[in-house]
Image: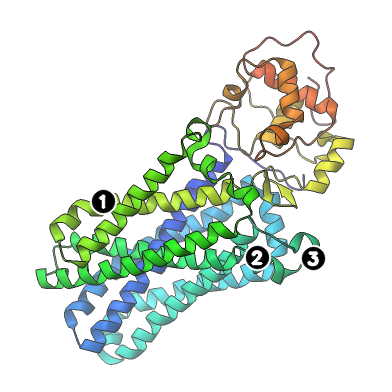
Amino acid sequence: MLFPSFHIPLLGDGMTIALVAVTHVLISHGLAIGMLTLIVVLQHIGLRNNDHEILAMAQRMLKPVVIIVTAVGAVTGAGIWFTVSVLAPNGIGSLLRVFFWPWFFEWIAFSLEVFILLPYYFLWDRMNATHPKRHLALGWSYVFVAFVSAFLISGILGFMLTPDGWVQEHALWTAFFNPTFWPQLFLRVLGGLTLGGLLSTGYILYSFRLDLELRRWTARFFGGWIIVCGSLAAVAAWFYFDAIPSTYATHKVFAVMTSHFSQQPQWLLLANLLAAAFVFGLALVAYFRRLRLAHVLIIPALLSAFLFVVQFERIREFIRGPYLIPGYMYANQISLTLSEHMSRTGLLDSSAWAAEQPERLNPVAPAGHALFIANCGVCHTIGGLNDIRDRLLGRSQPAVNVLIRRTNEMVPFMPPFSGTPSESNTLAAYLYELAGNQRSINAVPPIGRKGVDNE
């Protein structure tokens, strides 16, 4: 392993990264792209029609958006970097080596967003009184930079699922303009605009400072916005999932339904249809200015949109298993070439750092625990989410050993074991006892190395 990594004991590494990342996506797409674009569009309409009521409404909408984007959005953006650097250092290190320049320009774009957004908010009254067109141009420049940021991120995230010819060529352009780049870019932008329309509709429905006529006009405008952007986002989603290799696409139902409900895929389809009905139902009643019915539908519509985002991010992350980068690195941050090397020389002897075993954890087997953390710790915990003990309960020690050695053959989205046959026996003995069983008298001899005590 190139870097030491840390693991979250109960919540798990994957869930920790997901919570931070999804929160950031909801803010960056729904507010920073979607709602701010709508605010600039409203300002454009207000200036063109010399409508001060629309301008005042756009200004009031801007305040909470700026606060959330610059506070929570910026913190979660930095939080993504912190969590992945601590929990997945080898993975993020590999991505930085491939996408140094795109990420460099993304950081510049993110800084520009802040540098434009703050003057756009604080100079609203002054510039609209003296140079309204310049202030509007400032708003449109923010929208442009936000779209550039989405452009850069889509290439990097798409590469993590469909690196395509990069594995052979190692060319930046091949990696960036990968097969899922364009559909994902359109899906993210159009999805963000749709979510922005839903959030803006919620704002005007619960804003008591708008007169009825303005509220009705705005509801109609936002309803049409959601219908158009939402329909285009659905088309982009179809193209996106069509561009995913079938090897990975077959896992998308399991990604959402997990092993408990994956045999009833019809429920996922029905849930998605119901969620879409809430979103487009709200859009239609808003378009036809049925404000009372819109008040009833806005909450389920927003929840449905949030769940669509969570579902998409979950599927995108899950289906590429057993890889973090297909054809290059497994999900446990062990590259394919290093995994092959470890099968001959051993994982422990190939690792500069090994995870220490927590106190009060039985069995006391530092080498077994280190092997578990390196191979399985990215997805499984001990006593938390996706508890490894629940997965092994009732299995015999030989069965655990076979499962470890044949993991990738039995469960295609799980990485293969990295280590020697002796180390797999050590891990099997450790997990067997960890699951509450008495260690077999035929347990393998202890294995250890410098810095890791023998079992």
Vertical order, 455 against 197 (above or below): above
Q: Is residue 224 visible?
A: yes
Label located before the other in sequence (1 or 2):
2
What kind of residue is marked 1?
Ile
* Horizontal and vertical percent position of residue 163: 69, 60
Q: How is the image coloured?
A: rainbow
Pick the front one: 12 or 175: 175
Q: Outermost residue, front direction?
A: 266
What kind of residue is marked 3?
Glu
Circle 3/circle 1 CB separation < 8 Å: no
Q: Which residue, given by chain and number where applicable, does mark 3 sit on?
A: 169
Say which element carries label 1. Answer: helix
| Residue 344 in the figure: left or right of residue 410 | right
Q: Which residue, given by chain and number where applicable, does mark 1 sit on?
A: 299
Q: Which residue, given by chain and number where applicable, does mark 2 sit on?
A: 178
* Horizontal and vertical percent position of residue 65: 33, 65
Pick the front one: 300 or 79: 300
User: What is the quadrant of residue 166 in the picture?
Assistant: bottom right
Circle 1/circle 2 CB separation < 8 Å: no
The crowding category of the residue bearing disc 3, from other C-alpha atoms within 10 Å (few below 14, some 14 to 19, many at least 20), is few
| Residue 70 in the figure: left or right of residue 317 | left
Label located before the other in sequence (3 or 1):
3
Say which element carries label 2. Answer: loop
